[in-house]
Amino acid sequence: MLLVAIALMHQNSSLERDLSSLKARFGDQESKLQQANDIVAALVDPESQKVELVAAGNKPEPRGKAIYQRRNRSLIFFASNLPPLPAEKIYELWLFPANGGAPIAAGLFKPDAHGSATVVNPPLPEGVQAKNFAVTLEPESGSHEAPRGTAVIVGVGE
């Protein structure tokens, strides 16, 4: 009995150390997740102030940045300095596949009063590798099947 009790005490002590280690790792992961959530929330919040720095005296040009992860079909797109939309028009984001396939509509959007806009995780097909992205000016309902309007900004993947 004494040997069993000692063995159980040793095992209990080992389990307590493991539990303590897991609690510490869980707390660290929880903190990192909260930090990531805070960053994303600030980036996509329409009330966040976005300031682009350019050479003094130059008018900022329309810009966009697409962050795309094919594996998860995750796309975050930020635009700035977009011109105001004409009546009955909308901007449409397009993904151009690396395999040369048809462009894929990746979201309709309207910029805020400062020309900023965000598109986060639009529905995209699985496994598409992007060659590049573009934003076009389209009819208010969007084009959806292929860009018909004027390209406003175009980018090539890095």
Image (cartoon, grey):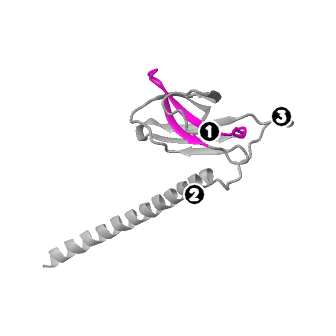
Front label number (2 vs 1): 1
Type of amino acid under label 2: Asp
Kindly report the distance in space between the C-alpha atoms of the residues bearing marks 2 and 3: 32 Å
Front label number (2 vs 3): 3
Question: Which span of residues is magenta-colored?
Answer: 81-109
- 8 in the magenta segment: no
At x 48% / y 30%, what residue is drawn? 145
Q: Provide residue 61's location: percent of width, then percent of height.
A: 74, 34
Give the SS element for disc 3. Answer: loop
Within the image, what quadrant is residue 6 found in?
bottom left
**Residue 58 image label:** 3
Answer yes or no: do the residues labelled 2 and 3 have beta carbons within 8 Å?
no
Judge whether 84 appears above or below 36 on screen. Answer: above
Kindly report the distance in space between the C-alpha atoms of the residues bearing marks 1 and 3: 26 Å
Type of amino acid under label 3: Asn
The residue carrying pointer 3 sits among few (fewer than 14), some (14 to 19) or many (20 or more) residues within 10 Å by Cα, namely few
In the rendered view, does 91 fall on the left or right side of 2?
A: right
Judge whether 42 appears above or below 23 on screen. Answer: above
Kindly report the distance in space between the C-alpha atoms of the residues bearing marks 2 and 1: 29 Å
Observer-nearest of 25 and 8: 25
**Residue 90 image label:** 1
Q: Residue furthest bottom?
A: 1
Q: Which residue lies furthest to the right in this view?
A: 57
In the rendered view, does 35 fall on the left or right side of 16?
A: right
In the rendered view, does 157 fall on the left or right side of 2?
A: right
Which residue in the structure is indicated by mark 2?
38
Q: Residue furthest left?
A: 1
Q: Which of marks 2 and 1 is nearer the N terminus?
A: 2
Q: Provide residue 47's location: percent of width, then percent of height.
A: 67, 56
